[in-house]
Image (cartoon, rainbow, N blue to C red):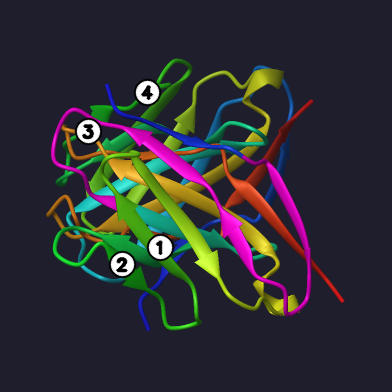
Amino acid sequence: AQSVTQLDSQVPVFEEAPVELRCNYSSSVSVYLFWYVQYPNQGLQLLLKYLSGSTLVESINGFEAEFNKSQTSFHLRKPSVHISDTAEYFCAVISNTGKLIFGQGTTLQVKP
Amino acid sequence: DVKVTQSSRYLVKRTGEKVFLECVQDMDHENMFWYRQDPGLGLRLIYFSYDVKMKEKGDIPEGYSVSREKKERFSLILESASTNQTSMYLCASSPPAWDNEQFFGPGTRLTVL
């Protein structure tokens, strides 16, 4: 069965510093991977996704994630964070029945 | 702008009450989902529906039921609310293909006293 593990529940970081949010998955089938973001008091919204092709995928607001098959990872990175990036981030994988399986979530706290 | 709306942002109910959570989407999506979100557990799928009047159990369906009489509306029902159902409930919708983005509503924070 597929599963997703987000290794850090909270990541505090200062503004303009780089950040990495870690995600590992287990899957026995083709892998479709997602990062969703939840800003305070809002629903989730898609940040980026990997379906096939280039292993490096980017979002419009400067985040990127790299699919690493050998390490079964899909870590999310940003070279310089802003206060507005403060949110909860969820990694997810599509199961072999088409359902999204979410990780536990990582709260990114950007400090001035 | 695509939208998923949920009937209430906050709801307080008493143990044993029947509770209805409503979700409406305006994107003509076939798939609709109900999740609950709890700290440290992420999102867990309760039920989903891939067509009108069709429903499938998710990972934690116990104590819940759903109804989908119209394509745009998916209701979550707590037949007899219990305190362990205090949680944030999120509705989502998507087109039918597996790799499609799910669009989420703002959530309903339910407290059962």
Mark with earlier residue (1, 2): 2
Q: Chain of mark 2?
A: A
Tell me what residue is drawn at x 74 percent, y 26 percent.
Answer: B14
Coordinates of residue A78 in the picture (x, y in percent)? 56, 71
Q: On what subunit does the disc labeled 1 rest?
A: A
Please tell me whether residue B101 is drawn above or below residue A74 in the rendered image: below
Query: Label 1 sits on what residue type?
Result: Ala
**Total numbered circles:** 4
| Labels 2 and 3 touching (C-beta < 8 A) | no
From the image, state whether disc 1 or disc 3 is nearer to you: 1
Q: Residues within 10 Å of mark 2 (few under 14, many from 20)?
A: few
Residue A76 to residue B41: above or below = below
- A10 in magenta: yes
Q: Quadrant of residue B89?
A: top right
Which residue is identified by label 4?
A: B59
- Under circle 1, the secondary element is strand
Task: Determine the image quadrant of residue B67.
Answer: top left
Both marks 2 and 4 on one chain: no
Label 3 element class:
loop
- The residue identified by callout 1 is A65
- Please identify, in this view, whether the residue under mark 3 or under mark 4 is nearer the observer: 4
User: Mark 2 vs mark 3: same chain?
Assistant: no
- For badge 3, the amino acid type reads Lys
Task: Report the Cα–Cα distance between label 3 and label 4.
Answer: 13 Å
Left or right of residue B13: residue A91: left
Instruction: Kindly identify which residue carries mark 3.
Output: B55
